[in-house]
Amino acid sequence: MSLKAILFDFNGVIINDEPIHQELINEILIQENLRPDELEYQQLCLGRSDRACLSDILSNRSRLVKENYLDRLIQSKTQAYRQRLQQLETLPIYPDIEDLMAKIQMQGLAIAVVTGALKQEVELVLDRAVLRQYVNVIVAGDETQASKPQPDGYLLAVERLNRQNTTLKLQPSDCLAIEDTPAGIQAAKNARIQVVGVANTYPLHLLQRKADWVVDYLNELDLDRVKQIFAQAA
């Protein structure tokens, strides 16, 4: 077994935009005459797609909505998100991301982004932050039927990386995921992918119970040591 690909989550790993998402979800709830709830947001939204988040919150509040109505809510939030980013002079990208991606690329490893965020949001951020050059594959929340903690996004990323490079012969066991939420960690685990938990959103001690490795900051991730561990497990 050898390490061949690093699969990044997006919100909370590449960009520190969870406060923006929570504010926009709260605005939608207020428009729906519902009171935002901090704990509910943490349980139903962190690490998950907008569709899963809003659908579960509305269901929790005994609101049954049709898919086209949910589509309109998501589209409204997406437009508001883009506007918020346009108002920012500098995007809140985590400072260690570019150096880590450059190192991964130099070592010949593939890079994918696996996220519940919409693809247009991911592309907007990666392009503006000049990170797109490092990313081989994007699997976004609007491209899979099931949200994290289901493994669909991760499995699709493996499939797309193999399609892009037919000599790679990538298996989930050849991948390392980087996640910041329990839902994301569980999604990687469900795909049989080892995972690093980074304490950007949840405290380190909580992630320690769920991930294979944990770090406070991504600059603490010793990629060479991880590669050695993968090689020893062969």
Image (cartoon, rainbow, N blue to C red):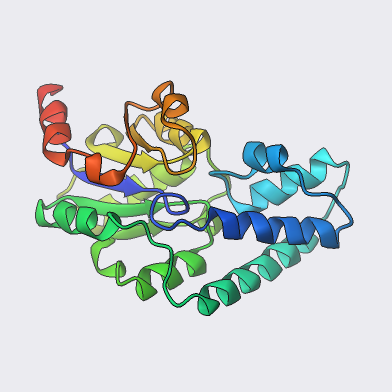
**Between residues 104 and 5, which one lies in front from this camera angle?**
104
Is 57 on the left-hand or right-hand side of 90? right
Q: Position of residue 225 (x, y in %)?
A: 13, 33
Q: Nearer the viewer, residue 196 or 159?
A: 196
- Where residue 193 sits in the image (x, y, percent)? 33, 33
Tell me if residue 86 can be seen.
yes
Q: Is residue 93 above or below residue 42?
A: below
Task: Report whether residue 1 is seen.
Answer: no
Image-quadrant location for residue 70: bottom right
Instruction: Give residue 19's position: percent from left, percent from top.
Output: 58, 55
x and y percentages locating residue 1 in the rendered image: 15, 29
Q: Residue at x 58, y 50 (%)?
A: 49
Q: Quadrant of residue 217?
A: top left
The picture quadrant where one finds residue 233 is top left
Q: What residue is at 32 percent from the left and 26 percent from the top? A: 212
Closer to the camera in the image, 137 or 171: 137
> In percent of the image, x 10 and y 51: which residue is there?
107
Instruction: Give the vertical position of 132 relative to 17 (above or below).
Output: below
Where, quadrant-wise, is the C terminus in this rendering? top left
Seen in the picture, residue 22 relative to 226 is either above or below; the reply is below
Q: Is residue 66 left or right of residue 213?
A: right
